Image (spheres, rainbow, N blue to C red):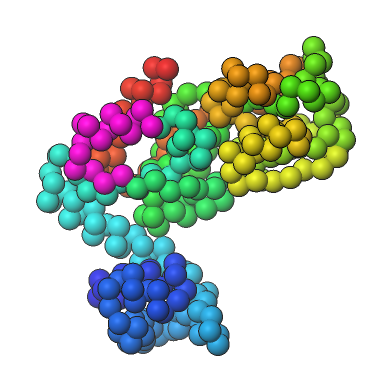
Amino acid sequence: MEVRQLQIFCALAEELNFTRTAERVHTVQSNVTTQIKALEEELGTPLFDRLAKRVVLTAAGRRFLPYAEKALTAMTEGRSAVCHGSEPAGPLRIGAPESVLAYRLPEVLQSFRKRHPQVELIFRPHWDETLWEALEGGRLDMAIRMIDTVNHPQCASVRLRTEAVYLIAHPEHPLAGKRAVGPADLAGEMLLLTEAGCAYRKKLDELLAAHRIRAGNITEFSSVEAIKQCVTAGMGIGLLPEIVVAGELRRKQLKNLAWLGPDLNIATHIVWHKDKWLSPGMVAFLDLLQEKLQAA
């Protein structure tokens, strides 16, 4: 089993297209086919199904993928340890939700870049349901996660801070003028929310279910910025971290509802796989996050 075969296999598992995989790994399509066939012969089982114009991972391919990713990650980490020693350098892949990346990290990244110019920062969005697979497979080195408690057995974490989470509406919305807004006031309302994997969205869902309250309609968005714009346009009530809407609240484009229900705030953690070698770049990034965010 050769390193090149593993690299091509992992690329094809992500692209699911022989042409794009060949371009990505800088080879010709016929070589991709040859390397995959050789790997399948060595393992004694098909790793991909070729269905007309579609390429799909087989069950064996899905089982093999995390091990291939781990092997490539270990090789990259070993090379980095030998080549760079204790100086932070090389790629550092960080997962972060949109709200944290856009509103908490710019200052951190500016400082990190000045201190450690040899580190190549790569940021990727994540949802909770795919986060652990990405950490275990080496597609992410670390991730910032908004959740009150990290209880995954394979995860190490450091708590950074607590983010205030607001129910917000257009200033002319009927609930914007109320001195107190409770769970029952949300019955029949249009709610503009993040996708179901979001931890603070889950808090609201559980609250409404516990009180047997049904919203008039729930519209889901993958972007917090889209939610903010739709609330600003008067389309409904949104649930967003305070950092996302602070400017609009100051300019009175949005109103923070006078919420008297259970706390909707959420903690923020930095997480990584407990068995992963903490490279100098990871340690430096972790130290800077704690310096900038825990002191805030």
Check the image and report above or below for 62 versus 231: below
The reply to whether residue 58 is in sight is no
* Secondary structure predominantly adopted by residues drawn in magenta: helix
Left or right of 175 in this view: 78:
left
Does the magenta run of residues contain 281?
A: no
Question: Horizontal placement of 295 versus 243: left or right?
Answer: left
Q: Please identify the quarter of the rendering in which residue 144 is found.
A: top left
Provide residue 55's location: percent of width, then percent of height.
50, 79
Say whether residue 51 is visible: yes
Q: Is residue 133 above or below residue 189?
A: below
Quick one: quadrant of the C terminus? Answer: top left
The N terminus lies in quadrant: bottom left
Residue 71 percent coordinates (x, y): 30, 63
x then y, percent, for residue 21: 38, 74
Image point 39% across, 50% down: which residue?
Answer: 140
Q: Which residues are magenta?
A: 106-121
The residue that appears at 60% across and 19% down in the rendered structure is 251
Residue ID at (52%, 77%) = 56
Residue at (12, 51) in percent of width and height: 83
Quarter location, residue 10: bottom left
Residues 105 and 209: in front is 105
